Image (cartoon, rainbow, N blue to C red):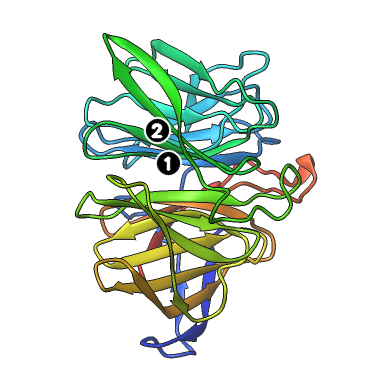
Amino acid sequence: MRTILAVVASGVLAASAVLTAAPASAAVPDLDLPEAGVFLEGIGVDDDAGLVYVSATNRSGTIYRAKVGDDRLEVWQGPTPGDNGRGIDVDDAGRVFVAGGPSAEVRVFSRSGRLLAELPTGEAGSFLNDVRVADDGSVYVTDSSLPRIWRVFRSGGAWQIELWRDVSGTIAYTPALTDFDLGGIVTTPDGKALLTTQGTTGRLWRIELRSRAISEVPVDGAPLVNADGIVLTGRTLYVVQNFSRQITRLELGDRWRTATTEAVVATPADRTFTTAKRVGGRLLLVDSKFGFAPAQAVAEDRVVALRKF
């Protein structure tokens, strides 16, 4: 089944334009799961090894993997009671970092699949949503339930997690413990700051890595409500808005301190995209199937390759 994504508002694209998923013969095809009934969430890409990782939320931390160019995901890490899978990122050494959502921990794996660390935050109510590896190797993690940014790092040969920034003085969670606030996170190309979205309010935030100062990135356009995963390519930011069923493309200015909406693309009513990663000239979008019955969580086309727009 092919997916049609229609442009509903655009600053540079004609309103009548349509964007289609990559054809089956493309170098980056859509990806099927080995089984139905799975609710997905996060995606990570190992560019050096040509690997794609996808997390499941209802399979006790199961992680799927595929080679770029394959059309089927396979189980890479099987279920472990108490584990969960949300955002994923991969560092230059091929280590895979997985946010655990309600398990309130980050798991670290080697490319070969060896579990290197399990790092709990130790805070009740913590919900670790998305992860981003920075240029210095530190890994920053958003907490959607508590106003926190966590940092994973290696010291003395051991992996550790720490509370890096309490954001409550600037970013109001609405309300804490019930909604998903900070979610998607990326680093700016100059390596100086984090950008993160707040799904409840639709606001975009910038956090300086050196000073940890927080400022809002004003968006010339509609609030980014239900913002989930985000992808930054140069000055272009793609925001996946899960239950709004749309993807917004923004152009960032003033060294990634301002944002202008350039296009809004509607996604199909039978899909709930949660996040994306860039592979070549395409975005790999994860269809979580959140909000649908397990019987509707089919195995086919669960990661969709979309030409960048």
Q: Nearer the viewer, mark 1 or mark 2?
A: 2
Query: Is residue 265 positioned above or below 70 on the image?
Result: below
Mark 2, residues whose alpha carbon is within 10 Å: few (<14), some, or many (≥20)?
many
- Residue 306 horizontal/vertical position (percent): 41, 61
Res. 43 visible in picture? yes
- Residue 45 horizontal/vertical position (percent): 34, 39
Q: Amino acid at mark 1?
A: Asp
**Helix, strand or loop under label 1:** loop
Answer with the quarter of the image where residue 108 lies.
top left
- Residue 41 horizontal/vertical position (percent): 57, 41
**Relative to 276, 194 lies left or right:** left
Q: Image quadrant for the C terminus?
A: bottom left
Nearest the camera: 25 or 206?
A: 206
Calculate the distance from the C-alpha at mark 1 to the C-alpha at mark 2.
Answer: 8 Å
**Relative to 120, 219 lies left or right:** left
The residue labelled by disc 2 is: 66
**Relative to 161, 190 lies left or right:** left
| Residue 71: image tag | 1
**Helix, strand or loop under label 2:** strand
Q: Are marks 1 and 2 in contact (CB under 8 Å)?
A: yes
Nearest the camera: 149 or 80?
A: 149
Query: Is residue 25 positioned above or below 70 on the image?
Result: below
Nearest the camera: 163 or 306?
A: 163
Q: Amino acid at mark 2?
A: Ala
Residue drawn at the location 62% of the way across and 56% of the way down = 172
Residue drawn at the location 63% of the way across and 35% of the way down = 127
| Residue 127: image tag | none
